Structures are given as C-alpha cells and as structure tokens.
Amino acid sequence: MLPESTKLISADDHVIEYPGLWLDHLPAKFRDDGPRVIKVDGLDKWRFQDELVGIESGSTRLLVGDGQEIRWVNFDEIRPGCYEPTARLADMDEDGVWGQLCFPNYARFAGHRFQKAKDPELGLACIRAYNDYLLDVWCAADRERLSGMALIPIWDLETAIAELHRAVEKGARAIGFSENPTVLGLPSVHTDHWDPLWAAVSEVGVPICMHIGSSSRLVTTSDDAPGSIQVALLGMNSIMAAVDWLFCGALERFPKLRLILSEGGAGWVPYVVERCDKVFWDYRVGRHQEPGARPPSELFAEHMYVCMVTEHFALRAIGDIPVDNLLWEGDYPHGDGLWPHNRKWLADAMVDVDDADAVKIAETNPRRVLGIR
C-alpha cells in the first residue's frame, strides 16, 4: 500500500497560460504579434495570427461546478490554480500531491503551435517567452515542488539545441518532443536527422517527454467515429511512439537518453514489449542481425517510462511492467485526473501493492528521472 509519508509526485500536469503571458515576456518588437486573449461574442479566446482558440472546460477546473459539461469558458470561471503558481501549490496541498511536472496547454505539448508562425523569429521568441515564464516565475514559486518541462523549437534543429541548453541552465527538468514528428512535416525518428539533438540531450541529462497529442493527431477509427473513440484510444499514440523508438536505433546510438511517454497509460506495456521482442528476432524483418542492435525489452527497461492516471491493471501487472519504469500522473487541471481526490484514489488502488513498489511509483521514480532532490 501507499505509505502516508510518501511525497506524491505527478509526472504530468499542465499550466493554463495566463492571458498576459506573451504580452509580459515577449521582446517589445514581437509583442503586438504574439498570442493574446481577446473577447469574441462574450468568450475569452486566444488570438495568434489568424487563429482563434477557446478555453474548454475539460482542460480546466472550474470555480463552480465540476466541469463535466464540456463547454467554452472564460478565465474568471476557472480556478486560479490553473494559471497562478501559488494557487497551484494550494490546490496540490488539497489534493495530497507534493510535486508536479508541468506541461503547457495553449502552446501545445511540444510547443508546435508556434511552428505555424509566419515569422520564424516570432515562433522562437514565443517558445523562449513561455520557457522564461515557466522557469523564472512559475517554478520559482517552489523550485522543489514545481518542475518545468521546457519547450524547444523542434522545427529548427540548431535553435532547438540552443534553447535546450538555455532552458536547462534555467532549471528545466525535462524537454518536450513530438510523439510523431512526421505529422508536423518533420523527419521521423528513424532518420539520423535528430542525432545532434539526441547528443545534446544526452549531454545535459534531462528526459524527453512525448505527451499524447504532441503530434497534433490522435488515433481514431473512422471520420464519423464519435469523440469517445478517440479518447478511448489515447494510449495508441504512446504505443506507436514506443515502438518507433524501440526499433529506430537511436537508443543504441545514445545510451543515455531517457523517454517519458506522458498520458498514454501503462497497461499496454507487457503485450507491446513482448510483441516487439518477437519481431526483433523474426528472421524476415528482425533487427537482431544489425550490429549493436538490442532487444526491445532491454531498451524499454533502460530508457522508457510510462505514466498511469487511473489504471488498476497497470498495478496488477507490476513485474511484467518493470516497476522502476512506472510513474503516476494527476493531470491537473485536465479532466483525465481526479483532483481533489487523486491521493485517495491512488492509495485505494495501491492497497495490494508492495509498499516499496508503491513508493517507487509515487515518489522515488519521478525523483530519480527528473533529478528532484
């Protein structure tokens, strides 16, 4: 079971960017063209270039009501803990959560909203402004409890590497990457295009986070399938990313890389890893004949971390899922989490889990992976 003394650390939560983030943190020459919140028919909308994006209740926590009715909302309807760090710490205390790794929301999980910038300098400036806020303001509210996942402009390798170093020097504990960069018009992880980035990440020692949806495409079955199908299949994005990485050769070339597959679940791991091992040794298509190639099960155990939100099966599968590779996430303030009941749910779910394993999943695994002391 989960000992009461455990300091629960979530591996995936979100900053709802406050309306003035880019107005306050962009250089003056870009301020007029950066993202800002405007009123459109009485609703708050993010405006960037020709695009308007609303705030969905399912990605927030409301001041009144539980947010189960999905609708567009205004900032004055949502909890300050969604967008203000001191209030976030208070909401974490109410939830029994000690620490969080914080992802963006409007900026998209790999920062790829700014890939669309008509001016590449503006796109980079928007990435840097977000990181400045995240690391200099948000995490500064409590640098132990609030960990920042920084963005890099993955569409420009040279500037991505420069921003990686800048962000890590500011205290970033992870960086974001796309689960499938080809959807963004970028080379796949099966090419050597990314090798300079992997070398730089290996040097600085932070993990790479690939959140579901970080390719801007979620898996569904057909064009007319209801949204429930897409939500039910969220784990497919992480499964496909995992298989890509287990076979692409990058983990053999860069043995210090660590990958976190965020919000894709964990219960799929035993089947997928077993299947990948079978394919690895297959005489028709297997990689076992390639110099230096290693079985996927070994690569998974050494390099990959998966996150459970509200899964019972993943806990029953400990052993088939290496316990050292399993993390927990509360997903605050998004609707996949259970705030303010996350700790109670996890404690109840772990009642039959060995105490040492429960502490690993809830605290010491994320501490080790993220470098939290």
Image: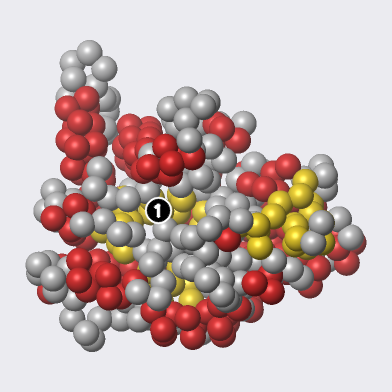
Closer to us: 282 or 115 = 115
Left or right, 266 with reference to 190:
left
Question: At which x and y percent is residue 309?
Answer: 33, 59
Left or right, 329 with reference to 322:
right
Question: At which x and y percent is residue 194?
Answer: 52, 39
Residue at 62% of width from left, 31% of height from top? 185
Residue at 46% of width from left, 47% of height from top? 212
Closer to us: 58 or 3 = 58
Closer to us: 275 or 236 = 236
* Residue at disc 1, secondary structure: loop
Above or below, 21 against 140 in this view is: above
Residue at 52% of width from left, 79% of height from top? 88
Above or below, 188 against 27 in this view is: above
Check disc 1 and report the residue beneath it.
Answer: 263
Question: At which x and y percent is residue 102?
Answer: 50, 67
Residue at 26% of width from left, 25% of height from top? 287
Location of residue 139 by image quarter: bottom right
| Residue 373 appears in the picture as rendered | no
Q: Residues within 10 Å of mark 1 (few under 14, many from 20)?
A: many
| Residue 91 appears in the picture as rendered | yes
Q: Report the number of numbered marks.
A: 1
Question: At which x and y percent is residue 40?
Answer: 82, 56
Location of residue 315 by image quarter: bottom left
Above or below, 284 against 303 in this view is: above
Left or right, 9 with reference to 170:
left
Amino acid, disc 1: Glu
